[in-house]
Amino acid sequence: MSQPSQAPTRSVVPPRSTHASYHPGGYGVSEGLKRARRPFAVRNAVTGSAIMAFAVGVYWYSISKVKQDDFSDLADVRAAASTSHPQKTTQDQSKRI
């Protein structure tokens, strides 16, 4: 007969006790927490650098594309709007009453 598969077991250590051991005295960082984070330091730095490079790249691309637009077509729109009938606002409506 085949053995029944076992569900993964949970840690028997309560979470509050691990928090107390990793953060002795409140907000400090213990040596155990430093050791636990050490294997992930390089991967976290590479991931953070990649995210930062992407954000800077999007910013640089957006700014460079906006700089090359000369907005000369907006002068035509503004000139046409100034010669047409002015739009009435709610303040204009209240002044008439």
Image (tube, helix red, strand yellow):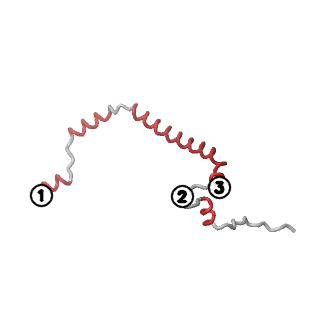
Residue 77 in the figure: left or right of residue 25: left
Mark 2 — residue?
27
Q: CA distance from mark 3 to mark 2?
A: 14 Å
Mark 3 — residue?
32
Q: Secondary structure at mark 3?
A: helix
Residue at 53% of width from left, 39% of height from top? 53
The quarter of the displayed image where residue 21 is located:
bottom right
Residue at 26% of width from left, 37% of height from top? 78
Q: Secondary structure at mark 1?
A: loop
The quarter of the displayed image where residue 67 is located:
top left
Q: Residue 79 in the image: state x and y as whole percent.
A: 24, 35
**Residue positioned most to the right:** 1
Q: Quadrant of the N terminus?
A: bottom right
Rate crowding at label 3 as few (under 14), some (14 to 19) or many (20 or more) other CA atoms within 10 Å: few
Mark 1 — residue?
97
Q: Are marks 3 and 1 in contact (CB under 8 Å)?
A: no
Q: Are marks 3 and 2 in contact (CB under 8 Å)?
A: no
Q: Quadrant of the C terminus?
A: bottom left
The amino acid sitting under disc 1 is Ile
The disc label shown at residue 56, or none? none
Residue at 16% of width from left, 52% of height from top? 92
Of mark 3 and mark 2, the one earlier in the sequence is 2
The quarter of the displayed image where residue 28 is located:
bottom right
Front one among 22 and 52: 22
